[in-house]
Image (cartoon, helix red, strand yellow):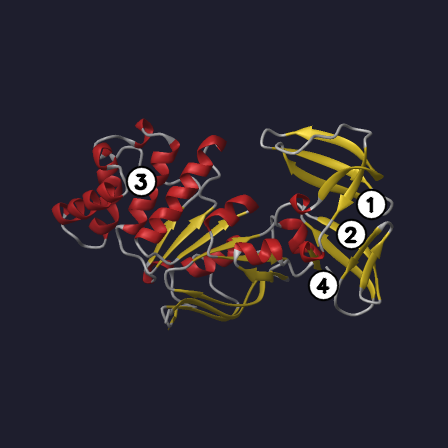
Amino acid sequence: MSETAIEFKNVIKRYGDTAAVDGMSLSIQTGELVTFLGPSGCGKTTSLRLIAGLELPTEGQVLISGRDVSNDPASERNIGMVFQSYALFPHMNVLDNVAYGPVIRGDNKAKAKDKAMEILDQIGLGGLQDRLPSELSGGQQQRVAVARAIVQQPDVLLFDEPLSNVDAKLRRKVRAEIRDLQRRFGLTAVYVTHDQEEALAVSDRIVVMRDGQIAQIGTPEDLYDRPASSFVADFIGDANLIAGTVSGGTFRAGDIALPIGGAEGSATISIRPERIRLLPDGPARVVSATYLGSRTEYVIATASSELLVSRPISEPAFVAGASVSVEIDADDLTRLAPA
């Protein structure tokens, strides 16, 4: 049975009259990677800083490994942190950068360097210990920053927008490396990003935040396939949000009619672009077709709305102006709570 590594109990953080975090309650299990995701100003970075001890809650409690640390400064918490800028010491080589934390905590230099070298070997940087940070690629610098954090065996490892300074082509590789290291070392990690694809790729669970509150918590699959609200559906990936009415167990919007459960009356459904199929001829019209290598994205005009549709290039292509039929399976729609 997993243990709780981090717990927020009705945490509020105010700056003047503004609540950056507003009544958050959340448990993170040992060995779990949880991502705080949301638009700018939603409270995700403040939540991370509350765990780190860089901010203290106005109300409520923050617990780490069962200990109330709500009023403890960062120096009294066993936390590792990987910053946006990596914060590597430019005048120190890789080995000294990684060994710096253990030295500061009281290890003699030889023991600290042995620990650092062991970590560097484990993460594939064993041959680079004598290089300066300026002599490393962005991805290598990222791994050094992670090594420097985990060499101290922290209770929790925090990532603050760790890929914001990584070239777009490297992001997929580096995020996979971060996930691999987190799993290999069994680390409890909290990750902050505004990038939805990044969050889906690295997380065990995602906390979607809005206006200082939790909009929804779930696995990447839960949030993508079963969003609870229009906000979550629209924020996680692409979604077609269609407003209509439910009557007699059927959702209707223009020429769309799909079986659906729940109360009768006004309703909004979410359908992912790749779940919609296109067939030749029909009442709908292709407004645009955009080739994107592995897929083609279409904008389709129906009687009720315009739909974004994504289809693999293995299927026959349609050109702008073509008449098409739209097919949607009832299992692929989600009825949403009001935003």
* Cα–Cα gap, marks 1 and 2: 7 Å
Mark 1 and mark 2 lie on one chain; the one further toward the N terminus is 2
* Cα–Cα gap, marks 1 and 4: 20 Å
- The residue at which mark 2 appears reads as 242
Closest to the observer, 101 or 228: 228
Mark number, residue 305: 1
Determine the image quadrant of residue 175. Answer: top left
- The residue at which mark 4 appears reads as 337
Mark 4 and mark 2 lie on one chain; the one further toward the N terminus is 2
Quick check: 144 left or right of 339? Answer: left
Instruction: Give the amino acid at mark 2.
Output: Ile
Question: Alpha-carbon neighbours of circle 3 within 10 Å: few (<14), some, or many (≥20)?
Answer: many
Mark 1 and mark 3 lie on one chain; the one further toward the N terminus is 3
The picture places residue 41, in percent across and down from the top left corner, at: 60, 51
Mark 2 and mark 3 lie on one chain; the one further toward the N terminus is 3
Asked whether the viewer can see residue 206, the reply is yes
The picture places residue 68, in percent across and down from the top left corner, at: 40, 72
Instruction: Give the amino acid at mark 4.
Output: Ala
Q: Secondary structure at mark 2?
A: strand
Q: Residue at x 75, y 69 (%)?
A: 262
Closest to the observer, 226 or 50: 226
* Cα–Cα gap, marks 1 and 3: 50 Å
Quick check: 133 left or right of 281? Answer: left
Instruction: Give the amino acid at mark 1.
Output: Ser
- The residue at which mark 3 appears reads as 144
Q: Residue at x 47, y 53 (%)?
A: 203
Closest to the observer, 192 or 19: 192
